[in-house]
Amino acid sequence: MISTRNLPEGAIDGRQAVARAPIGHIVPKPIPDSHTQDPRKYQLNQMKRRFSPIQNTLQDGTTNLLFQLKPSDPDFPFELDYLRCELQVPASYPERPPILRVKNKDIPRGFAVNIEKGWDRLVHEGQASTLLALTNALDKNLEAFLSERKTETVTLLSFKDTRHLDSSATALGETSAPPVQAPPKSAPAVRKPYVPEESYTDEQIATARARRAQEIRQLEARMSRMPYYQKSADGVVYTLPLEPRRRAELPTELQQIHSVQLIIPLLYPLQSLKLLLNDVESADAEALEDLFAERAAQQKQMSLTSHLNYLTQNIHVLARHAEASRKRIVTAPDPVTGASDNTTQQGIDSNEVGRDGKGHIHVIPRPPEWTYGYDNGDSDDSDSDYWDSEDESDDGGVAVDIGNAPGSGTEHQAEKGTAMSFPSVELYGIELLQVSILNLSVKCERCRTLNDITGLSPGVEKASSCKKCATAFTARFRQEMVHQNSARAGFIDVACCTVADMLPSTFIPTCSRCSTPSQGLISVRGEAITNVCRECHQKFTFKIPEIKFLAISHNTLPPPSSAPRKRNTEKLGLHAGDPLPGRGACAHYRRSYRWFRFSCCARVHACDRCHDDAEDHVHEWANRMLCGWCSREQNYAVEACAFCGRSVIGKRGKGFWEGGKGTRDKTRMSRKDKRKFRRVGGSEAAKKRE
């Protein structure tokens, strides 16, 4: 055991002999000979083994290494998969420092400059560090470099001097030709007035940015996982997939569209959207793109998703209108010629007015869109003008041809029959509501009994009969659209009955954002139905608090031609009050005093065996009977007649003769019935012999 009492001078305790190791014992980190002889080649080999870069050498001896640096921090906050780096190592390295260039296209140039400046600082601080050590330091400080304020950059554009192409150069010593005087123009060019750039307040800009961020989040959540989706580095241009709903109706040159580029300005919606169609020629798509931009500027309340849904649903309509406007521009008269013609015409008109002496009368020409649908000469101009007038006030949807839709829901029905309306209907996110399948409760005019008519489709007449008196009645529903300005759902034509109430029926709401009809939803009075549109995913709700029926005319349908067909009943020659032959008993059941009317053939037989012997089919359960004492037909009763009160079985209360085979089932007999255990285990005589 080593004693610690006599410690050497300078020792702290028994565990340490000296305070610090002698300076002569410190050994530097070993450096390979290859690093000492050629540090540039050694460090380049390190980078090759670590990153496997693409290497090329310039004429001045500079070596370029192109590699990808993946951030090693698991909590790296930026969406950066790889940092594409180009490392330029001069031929005189390490005397001259290495230079780093960032090649990522998705990183704005200002942030790339921050990373390059950070690399320069690392090189300046660690001059003795190797290229691999500097790259590792860049990886550790990458988050700090990207978090710095973006460096302001300037984009330089070069303009080529083309003045020598416009006018021929004059050689030195030559006299220039005298200028040729151009013929005077008939009319001076009209100068466009100066339009100052629109300015916005700070509050408007903040509101616009908040709305833009929200709508872009919705757009990315819906489209980011779909094919063709791309987003520019500055977040302004989005490449989105497009699948036209009616691709076959598009012009031939536009049927190859599969994606579009949506340009969303930074101050959207203060600045309007722009659209670029991919996969088609620019000359064919220019008119359609301009038309979409005009509509987007008019409908600023619509979201980005709504604009995209409208384009998907109605691109064929926009294409037709763009083609019509392009033809109108081509066929437009020359402005100079047109102006002279107008001047001449005005002179003629003024002379005529002066001759007539009616200068105070001005003739107002009829607008061309008023002749739409009434002019026999179909012209492209009138159609396009009508489309223009509708498009200015339309919030969405597809143009409807009025002349080709005689049976559409917009046709006004004749006001007759019973009008059904929803006075206090509540529609949220719904532009149209229609009843697709109507279920009614009607009252029979003969016996005032309530009956149900279900599955009543628009325009289809349905017949039924009263469940009590069998009176035939018919009903037909004529549908109308319910919207914010009309609460009438349609008219009901009935015969031999009156409308009492509406049962749970099927409704089809139409979305107010994309004009897409939803699937059928069942609702009833007082119930609020909430659902989501399957096209634009907008939430909508409708509620019918009250239903009113107004009888305008009575029995608008002709009465049924014949009552429901009844089965031919046989003539038995019986009189009420007289007993049946043999009081209804038969050879099979001698103590059953009734006859049965079987439901399978509506014929009367004394029992099931008598039925099977007389008919060619197997009997079914009988639900009516004839009393053997009074011959009155009635619903089936177990023991007694409902009219005379006499028992129709052998002994009242026993039920042994009740209904044939069922009464002989010993498992259903009462335990007090002696017939339940008769002849069980043999006869009684056999027991006595034993």
Image (spheres, grey):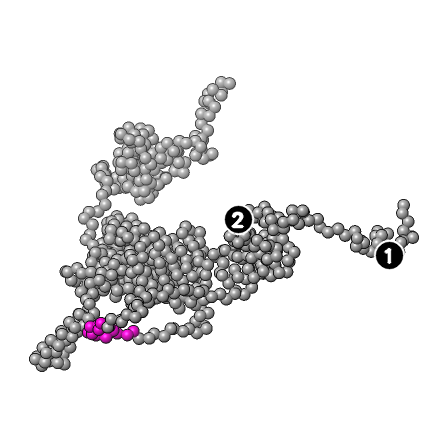
Label 1 or label 2, whichever lies nearer to me, is 2
Height in image: 620 above or below 522? above
Give the residue displayed 37% in from the left and 64% down from the top.
Answer: 160
User: Residue 333: horizontal and vertical position, in percent?
Assistant: 19, 66
Q: Earlier in the sequence, mark 1 or mark 2?
A: 1
102 vs 287, left or right, is right
Predominant SS along the magenta part: loop
Residue 466 location in percent, x, y? 27, 50
Numbered tag placed on residue 10 in the rendering? 1
**Residue labelled with disc 2:** 55
Is label 2 in a helix, a strand or a loop? strand
Q: Is residue 609 magenta?
A: no
Kind of residue sitting beneath label 1: Gly
Q: Which mark is residue 415?
A: none
Q: CA distance from mark 1 to mark 2?
A: 58 Å
> Which of these two is toward me, 222 or 11?
11
